[in-house]
Image (spheres, rainbow, N blue to C red):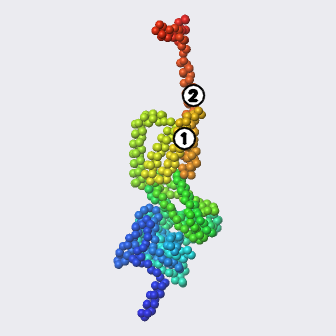
């Protein structure tokens, strides 16, 4: 009997590799703090998410030669959403891709018992369970085990539990075209998480991001890219953001890596939402372009809601602006007098200095992208200012100040238009109209004023006639009007 029990025990060891939370304290976290808590002669793992966006917790790596079953219990507190997937690594333990995305729940929920299957892949030598926490909050893990699937069991690629809702493919009576693009929102599983799906005959892209943010939050966008045909060495990802139909931000990044056929690659991008971001609805347009293939597009929208920090920031900005207005009003005469004495080149340099100050303030508020945009305009102002300084120094005969000032503003509008992919086209249009108005004011009224002044001076010129000289050598003269009166 003892030999039978021992034989069964050895067979279980050969067919199962169990990793208890207490025995494997090698969990790795990105954006989470990992702790181990003793509870009733047991140790459970507590992961605390410390920042907004998607944060990951990865279990110890397990060699994968056959299909594995990851079993665990999980509980959450105050999260925006909790996901799970299987992460795959190569022989150097370098992350390759992740599959079997499963939505566990949102907010706070009690213990759930889950099972997720890991199927071996040709390039993958190790696998791990990866828990994704959306936003801040805490999760607890217990009863974590990794076991081989017995031959009689059919490998499953989705969660098999009655306590979680899994996504299953839906068949419809219509056929999809190769370039069909779908958008799906996970409203049942997690309230603040949305998923965009691009799925055609050669590429599948899943994009995960939140629906609601606050100024100052970190926006994280996760891309799960599956190449269905051949090999792709580069995929360009472009994002355009529109606010009330006006493009306010754009981002473009090429992903240089090998996308093999049937392989899913997980990449993400994080960016902090500036505190100066105005609340409202923003439209996001994603452009996915594999090299040598057509661009795939999908769009969605996010809502930016104000919070206490934003209101405090607005009050501070209003106070600072009021102080600046007070100082400008107090010294307005001195400022205008000094500005009139500037040459055209000095005026452009003056506005460049103001732009540098504005860029520094914007950068201090965390809006690095907008500060870079202002810095581009500052560079253009300096270039045009220096060109005007050279013209004023050389004093060519063809120089006309009014025409040169209007031409300089048109040149600034042209440079800003050529940078429309970064600055958008609207600032260039505004500068163009300003140049037109200044051109009208400088050229047309100036001619009329000079003509009027010439008439006045001509009217005031009188003829003077010398009529004699005194002994002291003083000259005696009279005007034409006095001569006419004397003769009468």
Element type at marker 1?
helix
Neighbourhood count class around disc 2 (C-alpha, 10 Å): few under 14, some 14–19, many 20 upward: few
368 or 319, which lies in front? 368
Q: From mark 2 to mark 1, how far is it between C-alphas?
A: 29 Å
Question: In the displayed structure, does residue 417 sit left or right of residue 220?
Answer: right
The relative height of residue 314 versus residue 174 in the rendered view (above or below) is above
The residue positioned 60% from the left and 61% from the top of the image is: 289
Front residue of 42/158: it is: 42
Q: Secondary structure at mark 2?
A: helix
**Residue 171 in view here:** no
Q: Which residue is mark 1?
A: 387
Nearer to the camera, 93 or 333: 93
Q: Give the numbered dot on residue 474.
A: none
Q: Which residue is mark 2?
A: 448
Choose the circle earlier in sequence order: 2 or 1. Answer: 1
Q: Residue at x 43, y 75 (%)?
A: 73
Crowding near the residue tagged with mark 1, few <14, some 14–19, many ≥20 C-alpha atoms within 10 Å: some
Could you tell me residue 23's position as x and y percent?
Answer: 40, 78
Quadrant location, the C terminus = top right
């Amino acid at each position: 009997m003892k030999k039978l029990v021992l034989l069964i025990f050895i067979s279980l060891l050969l067919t199962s590799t169990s990793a208890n939370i207490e025995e494997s304290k090698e969990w790795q976290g990105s954006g989470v703090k990992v702790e181990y808590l003793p509870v009733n002669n047991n140790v459970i793992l507590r992961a605390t998410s410390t920042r907004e966006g998607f944060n990951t917790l990865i279990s110890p790596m397990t060699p994968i030669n056959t299909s594995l079953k990851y079993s665990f219990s999980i509980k959450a507190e105050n999260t925006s959403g909790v996901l799970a997937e299987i992460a795959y690594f190569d022989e150097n333990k370098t992350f390759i891709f992740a599959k079997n995305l499963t939505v566990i729940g949102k907010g706070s929920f009690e213990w759930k018992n889950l099972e997720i299957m890991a199927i071996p892949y040709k390039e993958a030598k190790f696998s791990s369970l990866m828990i994704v926490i959306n936003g801040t909050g805490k999760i607890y893990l217990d009863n974590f085990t990794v076991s081989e699937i017995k031959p009689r069991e059919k490998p499953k690629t989705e969660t098999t539990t009655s306590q979680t809702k899994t996504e299953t493919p839906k068949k419809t009576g219509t056929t999809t075209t190769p370039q069909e693009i779908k958008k799906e929102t996970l409203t049942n599983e997690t309230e603040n998480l949305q998923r965009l799906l691009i799925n055609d005959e050669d590429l599948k892209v899943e994009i995960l991001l939140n629906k609601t943010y606050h100024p100052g939050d970190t926006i994280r966008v996760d891309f799960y890219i599956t190449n269905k045909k051949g090999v792709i060495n580069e995929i360009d990802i472009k994002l355009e953001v529109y606010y009330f139909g006006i493009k306010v931000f754009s981002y473009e990044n090429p992903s240089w890596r090998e996308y093999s056929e049937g392989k899913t690659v997980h990449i993400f991008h994080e960016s902090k939402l500036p505190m100066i971001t105005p609340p409202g609805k923003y439209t996001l347009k994603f452009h996915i372009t594999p090299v040598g293939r057509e661009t795939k597009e999908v769009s969605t929208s996010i809502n930016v809601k104000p919070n206490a920090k934003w209101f405090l920031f607005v009050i501070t900005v209003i106070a600072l602006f009021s102080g600046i207005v007070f100082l400008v009003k107090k010294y307005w005469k001195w400022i205008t007098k000094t500005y009139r004495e500037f040459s055209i080149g000095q005026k452009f340099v003056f506005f460049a200095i103001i732009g540098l100050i504005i860029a520094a303030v914007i950068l201090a508020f965390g809006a690095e992208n907008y500060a870079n945009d202002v810095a581009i305009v500052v560079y253009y102002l300096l270039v045009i200012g220096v060109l005007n300084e050279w013209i004023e120094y050389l004093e060519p005969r063809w120089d006309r100040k009014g025409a040169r000032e209007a031409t300089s503003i048109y040149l600034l509008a042209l440079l800003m238009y050529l940078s429309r992919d970064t600055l958008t086209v609207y600032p260039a249009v505004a500068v163009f109209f300003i140049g037109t108005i200044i051109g009208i004011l400088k050229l047309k009224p100036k001619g009329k004023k000079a003509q009027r002044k010439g008439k006045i001076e001509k009217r005031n010129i009188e003829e003077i006639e010398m009529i004699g000289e005194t002994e002291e050598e003083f000259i005696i003269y009279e005007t034409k009007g006095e001569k006419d009166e004397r003769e009468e």
